[in-house]
Image: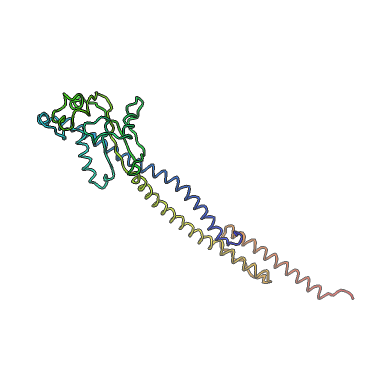
Amino acid sequence: MLSNLKLGQKFTLMLLAVFLGGILMSGIALSKLLNHTAQAELTNKALMLMETMNSVRQYTVDEVRPELADRSETEFLPETVPSYSAHQVFATLQASPEYQDFFYKEAVLDPTNPKDQADEFETKLVNSFQRPDSPEELHNFRNTPGGKLFYIARPIQIKQEACLTCHSTPDKAPKSMIDLYGSEGGFNWKLNEIVGTQVISVPAQTVFSQANQSLLITLVVFTGVFALAILLVNLWLKRYVVRPINRMAATAEAVSTGDTKAEFVKWSDDEVGNLTDSFNRMRLSLQMAMQRLERHRRKRKGNPGPG
């Protein structure tokens, strides 16, 4: 089949084969790279959010709680709870389109507020952080009934005595808090104990959609550049290779029918030009041979032999 194709067609097919192979291999490699890049970008953004939440928590402990200490003795004020402040600030951030896909939770094994109760997956994260060789941060993908999520988690560790005011024993906790949440959960915590985990998650589709969008744009640009390259190569091939060869073929056809004066026109000094010189030398040699043959024929005709 290939033998029946013209030179330009064969060259185009070769370029297309190279292009398809290259686009396949580069697409796979680029897809992995872009997924990793998008994941790293979301990780950095999530870590920034987590640092912001930790700053809010610390501000609540250092600034807000002392200011409301007198009122806290008679009524429970959620504004004095670091977890409440962090969630409220994050809810405000979620109003921004840039962070609307992010979710934040402080999951605790034994929480005061039942809505902070760690689920099975979050419990495993807390158990991992409680091990001596645990990393300071975990991130990966997880499957949920609502779809796949990309998460980043850090441990919640009791590092300040002030946190034990509400979580040591029920008799030391504010009466208003006991009246609101009861005395069953969120107590007997100890200093430096890891009691929960901060988790920021985002739908995995957000990661993949960003990567796929970048991949699509890159492949479109790459395809456009390669298509332009094929066009330019074909134009160059037609002008500097195919067209001179076709002219040489036409001249050779004329020479083969006896027109020895037909001359092969040289258009360049490259390999095609060298081929033109070779054909011209062959034409001259053929012309000289034909002339010698003609002189020899005339000589024999003018001097016929005996008999």
| Horizontal relation, residue 284 to residue 5: left or right | right
| Horizontal relation, residue 10 to residue 259: left or right | left
Please name the residue shown 30% across and 35% down the image: 119
The way the protein has been coloured in the rendering is rainbow
Please name the residue shown 50% across and 58% down the image: 233
Q: Where is residue 302 in the image (x, y as percent from the top left)?
A: 81, 76
* Relative to 270, residue 38 above or below: above
Could you tell me which quadrant the N terminus lies in?
A: bottom right
Viewer-side residue, 120 vs 21: 120
Could you tell me which quadrant the C terminus lies in?
A: bottom right
Viewer-side residue, 138 vs 234: 138
* Relative to 93, residue 11 above or below: below
Please name the residue shown 65% across and 69% down the image: 253
| Horizontal relation, residue 170 to residue 46: left or right | left
| Horizontal relation, residue 279 to residue 210: left or right | right
Q: Position of residue 100 (x, y in %)?
A: 26, 45
Q: Where is residue 295 in the image (x, y as percent from the top left)?
A: 76, 71
Badge count: 0
* Relative to 2, residue 100 above or below: above
Viewer-side residue, 70 vs 169: 169
Q: Position of residue 180 (x, y in %)?
A: 16, 33
* Relative to 272, residue 83 above or below: above
Q: In which quarter of the image is residue 124?
A: top left
Q: Quadrant of residue 272?
A: bottom right
